Amino acid sequence: MDIQFVAQIDASADVVAFPVRKGEAGALGALLGAAAKQARFEGAAGAIAETAAIDGEQAKRLLLVGIGEGSEHDLERAGAALVARLQTSGVTTVHVDFASAGQSDEDDILSFAMGARLRNWRIDTYRTRLADNAKPSLAKIVVASSAGDLSARWGRYSAVADGVALTQTLVAEPPNILYPESFVERCRHLTDLGVELEILDERQMNALGMGALLGVAQGSTRPPRLLAMRWNGGNPGDAPVVFIGKGVTFDTGGISIKPAAGMDMMKWDMGGAGAVAGAIKAIAGRKAKANVVGVVGLVENMPDGNAMRPGDIVTTMSGQTVEVLNTDAEGRLVLCDAITWAQKAYDPKVIVDLATLTGAMVISLGHEYAGIFANEDDLAAKLIAAGEGSNNKLWRFPLSAAYDKLIDSPIADIKNVGPREGGSITAAQFLKRFVEDGVAWAHLDIAGMAWHDKEGPVYAKGATGYGVRLLDRYIAENHEG
């Protein structure tokens, strides 16, 4: 989608949208005011009312778009709502008249445009019989305001939107198309932005002793990969921030197989890896002045004759041994080796991992927040603030030595599951055992956030792109001068 910024509406514009603050619909003039009244439109964020007008011999389609109280999130919701209304309407260009509404704050306009751009993402790759009236038509948004041309500032926003779109596409792809090797191929274009890639294959991971990650992968014909994406935008020699993502491209549960109902949705069990890849694209795309590395452990968890069994003991790269009681608690096995490798390879001061890790997190928080666990209060506070700012919200859960006894194994160093209660917490306690002293670490359990069955503020039903804007904002607010 092309988004342009101009000083005033072109007289030839035949589809025009007017942003309206909550409670200000009465000041729209006779025609628009009547349209607002008939639709009970009061300017709530994302609300839309429509009417038509004749200007000479030209018919014009006029839309009122509620921007609520005018907050960043309200404006994003408004831009998204406009795109949702017009995306398949037959309209190719819509002009947005911030100028006549007196709303000319640059940040407001850019937030509105960001919401529009985010909501425009969709995946039609496999639709061969899509009706003409269901195909997207909207190709351009022209935003008019007293701020005029904002294209220079827009580039930063657009780069982040590109990162979110990458994540959504990765999460939405079917598992016969997206698997460890093809995930890597989908990320090779990041080198065009200056990102350095390092790829470890099965042989290399075996030599490093990644018995936990390889144990998960051994039941699949798809070989695993570990992908590192490094952006060097900060001071040379400064320790990087490392983001680590769980990349289980399809999760059957392995020998501890999942129920058939809903298993198709386990294609998005690589949502953490998808978020990390998208965040690196966003950070590199806007040329962030920070050193950031994204590491993703990529496996497919299948119930083959060679698959890992409940009761097996695997040796992790750290040397710690794990008794595998449930092969469906595989994400933590992938992450623990990725965490160990990242610490040895990059000596980071900060690690943030993201994973669709536990169903217990969905029971706890539903689809409104992701859970955060952290070994440092300052890091937790900064990530929670970035979550509020990006509308990728986080809610903190406890870490405590009191939970460790729940994952102590009688035969190995650790077991990979605890009891049913506190399932998200014991998963986090498991990962904590692989974080070295002096490393600030946070674990984000995004199980309820990577995919939604309902439309959200800036996304349609399906892949949400959760995590990209959160990580990008965390870097921008805390690691750039």
Image: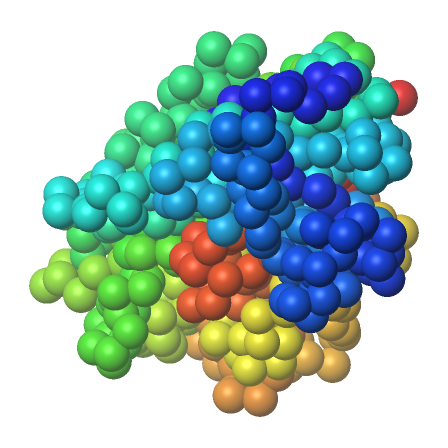
In the image, is 320 to the left or to the right of 136? right
Give the image quarter of residue 256: bottom left
Expressed as whole percent of the image width and height from the top left, the position of residue 260 reads 21, 77
Residue 284 position (above or below residue 344): above
In this figure, which colouring scheme has been used for the structure? rainbow
For the residue pair 94 and 109, the one nearer the viewer reads as 94
Residue 164 seen anywhere in this rendered image of the structure? no
- Residue 453 rendering spot, x and y as whole percentages: 43, 68
In the displayed structure, would residue 309 be above or below residue 35?
below
> Where residue 316 appears, x then y in whole percent?
45, 52
Q: Is residue 349 above or below residue 74?
A: above
Whether residue 33 is situated above or below residue 17 in the rendered picture: below
Task: Find residue 37 and report its image quarter.
Answer: bottom right
Residue at (81% x, 34% y) in the render: 100
Q: Residue at x 77, y 52 (%)?
A: 30
* Rendered residue at 56%/47% (across/down): 52
- Say left or right for 298 vs 55: left
